[in-house]
Image (cartoon, helix red, strand yellow):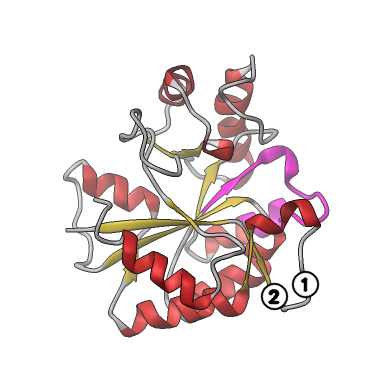
Amino acid sequence: MRVVALTFHDVAAEAGDTAPKGERFYQIQAGDMENLLTQLRKKGYRTVSSRSFRAWQQGKGVLPERSVVFTFDDGYASHYEVVVPLLIRYRYTGTFFVTTDFVGRNGYATWEQLRKMVFLGMEIGSHGRRHVSLTSTGDLVTEVADSRTILEKVIGQEITGFCYPYGHLDALAVDAVHAAGYQYGCAIWRSPLTGLLALPRIYIGDRDASARLLAKWYRYRYQLR
């Protein structure tokens, strides 16, 4: 069985609704995302949460024959305003990795919105407190453990997943994620540290318009277990 995990960032509602220049690399258009959802639905794909995927890896559950994992990083306001309605429309779900210090800032979701996302069947994970590289910070406890404590206190549910900011990780970062009690961690591409605490995902960005996005999906769906 093959399961592919995709990672998105900001999703623009309108074609002219672009992010600041330095952040456009991480943004896609809602129309492109909806086109992907339409194609996957036609082909019988179903989404599973990162938590369910992790349980399946441990032999604790069964996944649909055609499964895809949708993940969304940083906690943008568009995740609540644009992404969640799209996912619900297509009967899909997603995992949203939140940078706790960004919550409530301009362009980012509020705590109330995050709680509503959980109510609507979405999964919340940690993306650290300040979105700093874990390979260069000297305070792994604050970024990894404290962010989980904050999320669990405010969201009101166990936080089982961590996503490495920028995809940067090393042995110390992986050990910190394990020590903080996370059940799984998400990276980007495969690396020597790929495993339960560094699951590979396929990055989707601003250059991945509809046709390229679908081509990327077909290319990688056969390569990830």
- Identify the residue position indicated by label 2 in the image: 13
Q: In which quarter of the image is residue 175?
A: top left
Q: In which quarter of the image is the N terminus?
A: bottom left
- Name the residue at 68% across, 59% down: 113
Q: Nearer the viewer, residue 57 or 42?
A: 42
Q: Quadrant of residue 165?
A: top right
Asked if the magenta segment contains residue 108, the reply would be yes
- Name the residue at 61% across, 55% down: 115
* Residue 134 percent coordinates (x, y): 57, 25
Q: Which mark is residue 62?
A: none
Amino acid bearing label 1: Asp
Q: In which quarter of the image is residue 133?
A: top right
Mark 1 nearby-residue class (10 Å; few <14, some 14–19, many ≥20): few
Q: Is residue 148 left or right of residue 186?
A: right
Q: In this view, does 169 lie to the left or right of 11?
A: left
Q: Which residue lies furthest to the top in this view?
A: 138
Q: Are marks 2 and 1 in contact (CB under 8 Å)?
A: yes
* Residue 158 percent coordinates (x, y): 47, 40
Mark 2 nearby-residue class (10 Å; few <14, some 14–19, many ≥20): some
Q: Which of 195 and 15 is in front in this view?
A: 15
Amino acid bearing label 2: Ala
Label 1 residue SS:
loop
- Identify the residue position indicated by label 1 in the image: 17
In the displayed structure, would residue 15 be above or below residue 72? below
Q: Is residue 81 left or right of residue 124?
A: right
In the displayed structure, would residue 177 be above or below residue 159? above
Asked if the magenta segment contains residue 63, the reply would be no
Point out the stretch of residues depicted in magenta.
Answer: 96-114
* Residue 171 percent coordinates (x, y): 42, 19
Give how far apart the Cα atoms at labels 2 and 1 are.
7 Å
